[in-house]
Amino acid sequence: MPLSPAVVLLVLFLAGPIAYCAYIAFTDLQLTGQAESSFIGFDNFRAAFKDDAFLNAVWLTLVFTVLSSLIGQNTLGLTLAVLMQRASKPVRTVTGGIVIAAWVLPEVVAGFLLYAFFRREGTLNAVLDWLHLPSQN
């Protein structure tokens, strides 16, 4: 019973969109145009796999994933761990600090950007003023 809210949220925000995407994949639903959609089976998939641009995008995604994630991150991480294990205490401390800074820095930058965007003199109000709309607090 205590997990009920979590299960409801998972179904609502995870299973719901997945089921809707599966529905869209097998119909001829369009963003513009006809209001009604009909079941077309695997026609969307056939069209996608015949398209050279789609196949190129899939190929580039696989290459990027293999080279970046699997080879790059694992090799770099293992090499760094082995080098840090053999290094002196000051080198380990500095290297560990650099690695942790690399993990923390994106969140700090994102927080600063959101702050700069939403403050009274920020980008949001500048754009709203440019569009002659009321500014936000």
Image (cartoon, rainbow, N blue to C red):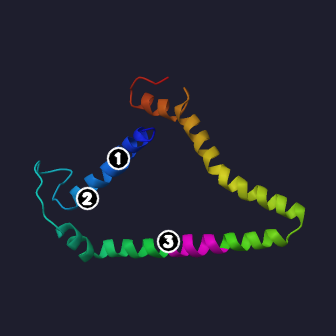
Mark nearer the N terminus (3 vs 1): 1
Give the residue drawn at x 72%, y 55%: 100
| Residue 69 in magenta stretch | yes
**Tag nearer the camera, 3 or 1:** 1
Distance from disc 3 to disc 1, alpha carbons, whole Å, reads: 29 Å
Q: Residue at x 38, y 71 (%)?
A: 57
Quarter-of-image position of residue 135: top left
Label annotation for residue 2: none
Q: Which residues are magenta?
A: 64-75
Residue 50 or 75: which is nearer the viewer?
A: 75
Residue beneath label 3, please?
Answer: 65
**How far across and down, in percent of the image, does residue 102 sit?**
68, 56
Nearer the observer, 84 or 104: 84
Callout 3 environment at 10 Å: few (<14), some (14 to 19), or many (20+)?
Answer: few
Instruction: Name which residue type carries label 3.
Output: Thr
**CA–CA distance between discs 2 and 1?**
15 Å
Q: What distance separates the C-alpha of mark 2 from that of mark 3?
A: 24 Å
**Residue indicated by mark 1:** 11
Quadrant housing the N terminus: top left
Residue 59 % position (x, y): 40, 76
Above/below status of 63 relative to 116? below
Is 45 placed left or right of 98 in the picture?
Answer: left
- Label 1 SS: helix
Foreground pick, 89 / 134: 89
Residue 52, horizontal then vertical, whole percent? 29, 76
SS of the residue under disc 2: helix
In the drawing, does residue 87 fall left or right of residue 106? right
Q: Which residue is mark 2?
A: 22
Which callout, 2 or 1, points at the residue further toward the start of the chain? 1
Amino acid under label 1? Val
How many numbered marks are there? Answer: 3
Residue at x 21%, y 73% (from the top left corner): 46
